Image: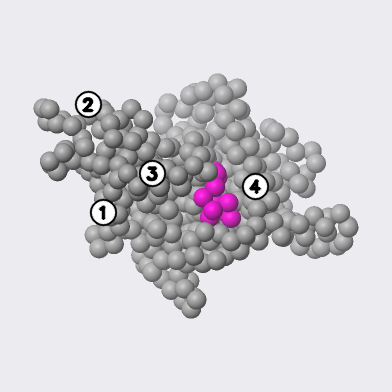
């Protein structure tokens, strides 16, 4: 089981990794398929028109998450990591005005968003709550090609056949292509003891089978720079977030007050929590506004890990660039284990899989750079995840705003608390991280669908104003 740090942390746009980045990537894949030789193209047939249907959670909350916009952008050849947020509206307007998409390297395809982009709330697809169907037709309306894709969280997209293969019993839980093929926390700790390496060092060794050390460091630095820039943007912008709830951005005002307190040296017993919270909120306000963010491990939970890193840099003057890299490598190791054995998708297991996973990853990363042993790091991750078990995903109006933005702030606070508790112990604890991950998986399976990113239960229906 090998999941690269750059699979866990992907630069993209808001407001959702599964509902925005995933559908955009699915559209990219379908365009590539059209040009490929991987399907039986009838003689003389040419693709002239496209249709897309969204199912399950994508249908219920897709409008609030910008799913339709993401599909249109993807069909125009835009990609999550490179699309210019300032140009997105103009691209959407062009498609709506002309009734066609014009991706680079392709002929124009007919695509009327009002009729060819369907939010199908009645017919879920069997593989996953986030299902999409892409179809291509010739000029006579004959179906030439159809593919089903699933957005399985964190921006990951698979076809129906790929998803089926993922769920087949595995002959081995490890990946022999890397030197430390851990797929569980127990294996991770055993390999660490056997090798004498830290979790970050093992993760680095695995990554360096696919790239040089310099390439790895440069990539990690790009991830942190994108996170840092997102925090900085969020701390400078105020106003109302899009979507109709008229939720105000608060990070800038809170940040201004904290800076005033900092300069005046006034005593504030909650100062660390306040800084953590404002950093996390800045990221998720940017995400809610469709800005540039990093999945960590998802967009909905994108604020927890950057907040924990920024907190560490703020309160530890001896922090180095290498500390940040080790933080990200350790967090990615834990995130990979969670994704492999449970889920990071709110549509699959609720917000315990998003903010809960992010808190566990942040706690592990912070414990690592604070000098924790592998056992203390595993303990930190378990504490953070355990105290998110059962958390539902019930965004009001399908927008990643309430309760999502504040939830990231509290997730960051829990992560730091978990790391602090673990560092003060010796690494021994009652509940193993693997057991906690399995409990999250089972809890998610038992959770009602109305609490899993459909906005049909919880806060989404109990707030009178909505």
- State whether residue 341 appears in this view: no
Nearer to us of marks 4 and 3 is 3
Whether pointer 4 and pointer 1 mark residues with C-beta atoms closer than 8 Å, the reply is no
Going from N to C along the chain, the mark reached first, 2 or 1, is 2
CA gap, disc 2 to disc 4?
44 Å
- State whether residue 78 appears in this view: yes
Query: Where's the N terminus, which quadrant?
Result: top left
Whether pointer 1 and pointer 3 mark residues with C-beta atoms closer than 8 Å, the reply is no
Going from N to C along the chain, the mark reached first, 3 or 2, is 2
User: Image point 18% across, 40% down: which residue?
Assistant: 137
Whether pointer 4 and pointer 3 mark residues with C-beta atoms closer than 8 Å, the reply is no
Crowd rating for badge 4 (residues with CA inside 10 Å; few <14, some 14–19, many 20+)? some
Mark 2, secondary structure of its residue:
loop
Going from N to C along the chain, the mark reached first, 4 or 1, is 1
Q: Is residue 158 magenta?
A: no
What number is the disc on residue 115?
A: 1
- The residue labelled by disc 4 is 233
Going from N to C along the chain, the mark reached first, 1 or 3, is 3
Which residues are drawn in magenta? Answer: 284-294
What number is the disc on residue 94?
A: 3
Going from N to C along the chain, the mark reached first, 2 or 4, is 2
Q: Is residue 209 above or below residue 313?
A: above
Nearer to us of marks 2 and 4 is 4
- The residue labelled by disc 2 is 37
Whether pointer 2 and pointer 1 mark residues with C-beta atoms closer than 8 Å, the reply is no
Asked which quadrant contains residue 122, the reply is: bottom left
Left or right, 78 with respect to 427, comes to left
Q: Is residue 286 magenta?
A: yes
């Amino acid at each position: 089981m090998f999941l690269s740090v750059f699979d866990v942390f992907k630069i993209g746009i808001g407001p959702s990794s599964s509902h925005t980045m995933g559908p955009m990537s699915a559209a990219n894949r379908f365009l590539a398929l059209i040009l490929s030789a991987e399907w039986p193209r009838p003689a003389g047939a040419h693709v002239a028109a496209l249709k897309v249907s969204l199912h399950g959670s994508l249908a219920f909350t897709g409008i609030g998450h910008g799913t339709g916009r993401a599909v249109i952008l993807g069909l125009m050849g835009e990609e999550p990591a490179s699309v210019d947020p300032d140009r997105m509206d103009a691209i959407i307007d062009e498609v709506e005005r002309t009734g066609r998409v014009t991706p680079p390297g392709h002929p124009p395809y007919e695509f009327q968003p009002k009729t060819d982009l369907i939010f199908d709330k009645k017919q879920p697809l069997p593989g996953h709550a986030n299902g999409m169907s892409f179809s291509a037709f010739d000029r006579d309306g004959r179906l030439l090609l159809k593919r089903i894709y699933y957005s399985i969280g964190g921006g990951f997209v698979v076809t129906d056949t790929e998803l089926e293969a993922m769920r087949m019993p595995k002959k081995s839980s490890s990946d022999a292509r890397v030197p430390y093929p851990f797929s569980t926390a127990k294996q991770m700790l055993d390999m660490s003891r056997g090798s004498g390496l830290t979790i970050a060092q093992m993760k680095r060794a695995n990554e360096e089978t696919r790239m040089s050390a310099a390439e790895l460091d440069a990539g990690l630095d790009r991830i942190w720079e994108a996170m840092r820039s997102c925090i900085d943007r969020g701390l400078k912008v105020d106003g109302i977030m899009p979507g109709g709830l008229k939720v105000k951005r608060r990070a800038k005002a809170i940040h201004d007050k904290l800076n005033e307190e900092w300069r005046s040296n006034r005593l504030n017993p909650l100062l660390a929590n306040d800084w953590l919270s404002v950093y996390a909120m800045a990221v998720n306000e940017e995400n809610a506004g469709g800005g540039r963010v990093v999945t960590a491990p998802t967009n909905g939970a994108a604020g927890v890990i950057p907040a924990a890193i920024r907190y560490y840099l703020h309160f530890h003057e001896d922090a180095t660039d290498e500390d940040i890299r080790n933080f990200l490598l350790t967090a990615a190791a834990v995130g990979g284990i969670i994704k492999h054995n449970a889920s990071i998708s709110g549509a699959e297991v609720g917000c315990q899989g998003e903010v809960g996973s992010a808190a566990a990853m942040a706690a592990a990363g912070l414990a690592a750079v604070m000098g924790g042993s592998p056992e203390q790091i595993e303990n930190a991750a378990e504490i953070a995840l355990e105290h998110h078990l059962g958390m539902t995903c019930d965004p009001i109006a399908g927008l990643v705003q309430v309760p999502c933005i504040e939830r990231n702030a509290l997730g960051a606070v829990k992560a730091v608390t978990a790391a602090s508790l673990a560092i003060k112990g010796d690494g021994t604890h009652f509940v193993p991280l693997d057991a906690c991950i399995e409990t999250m998986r089972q809890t998610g399976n038992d959770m009602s669908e109305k609490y899993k990113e459909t906005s049909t239960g919880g806060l989404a229906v109990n707030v009178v104003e909505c």
